[in-house]
Image (cartoon, helix red, strand yellow):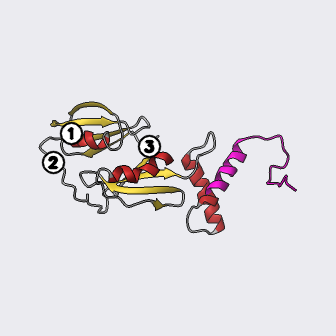
Amino acid sequence: MRKIQVQGVHHITLVGADRQTSIDFWEGVLGMPFIFEQPNLDRRSESHLYFDPGDGRLITVFCDDARKPGGTAVPQDTGALHHLAFAVSRASFTQAIERLEARGIRHSGPKDRGFMDSLYFRDPLGLLLELACYRFTPPAGASHADVLMEAHRIRVARGDSHIQDVHLADAVAALTERSRDSLSEDRGPRNPYG
C-alpha cells in the first residue's frame, strides 16, 4: 500500500446562494478577483464562480439565483467544516475590524493564537471565516510550516503549553543556522559591547 502524496490545496468549492451575493462578498469584501465563470458541469442549472484568494489557488462557489442568503450559522457537527482561514498581511489585519464594522459585519475581535493573530466572522450564508496573520517571517528557503514544526519541537522540549514568540524566534534562528554556512567557527551568541 502506498500514499497518495498531495502537494497543496487545489481549490475549495462552496455552495453559495445567488450569483451577486457571492461576487459582492468574495470580491467586494475580501478582495478576491472574480476570474471566471462557467456552468456547474454536474448541475447545469447552477453557475460556477471562480475567485483568486491571492496565492493563485481557487475558491469556487456554486450559485443559483433561486437561493437566497440565510445568514444562520452553518452547522459544525462532526465531519463538517468548522471554518475557513485566509492569510492576510499585518497591515490588512490591523484594518480588518474597521472594514468589517463599516459593513455591519459582527466579528470576534482579535484573538491571540501564540504564533498568529486571528479574527473570526461569518459570510452572508453563515460560514465561519477567519483572517489569520502570522507573527513571523520564515527565513529564506523555509516555509511557515518549517518554522512551526521547529517551534513545536522547541516548545515541547521546554515543556511549554503552546507556541509563543520566543519559540518562533528560536526556530527562525535554528533554521537559519542549519541552512546557511558561516566562516565563523563559533556561531553562538556574543556581546560585542563588553
- Badge 2 amino acid: Lys
Residue plotted at (42% across, 38% down)? 54
Which secondary structure lies at badge 2?
loop
Q: State whether residue 4 appears in this view.
A: yes
Question: Where in the figure is residue 115, as x and y percent of width and height?
Answer: 54, 57
- Badge 1 amino acid: Gln
Vertical position of residue 146 compared to residue 60: above or below: below
- Name the residue beneath numbered marker 3: 4
Tell me if residue 22 is in the magenta stretch. no
Vertical position of residue 45 compared to residue 125: above or below: above
Residue plotted at (24% across, 36% down)? 48
First to last magenta residue range:
168-194
Q: Nearer the viewer, residue 54 or 25?
A: 25
Nearer to us: label 2 or label 3? 2
- Badge 3 amino acid: Ile
**Sequence-first tag of 2 and 1:** 1
- Horizontally, residue 126 falls left or right of residue 177, namely left
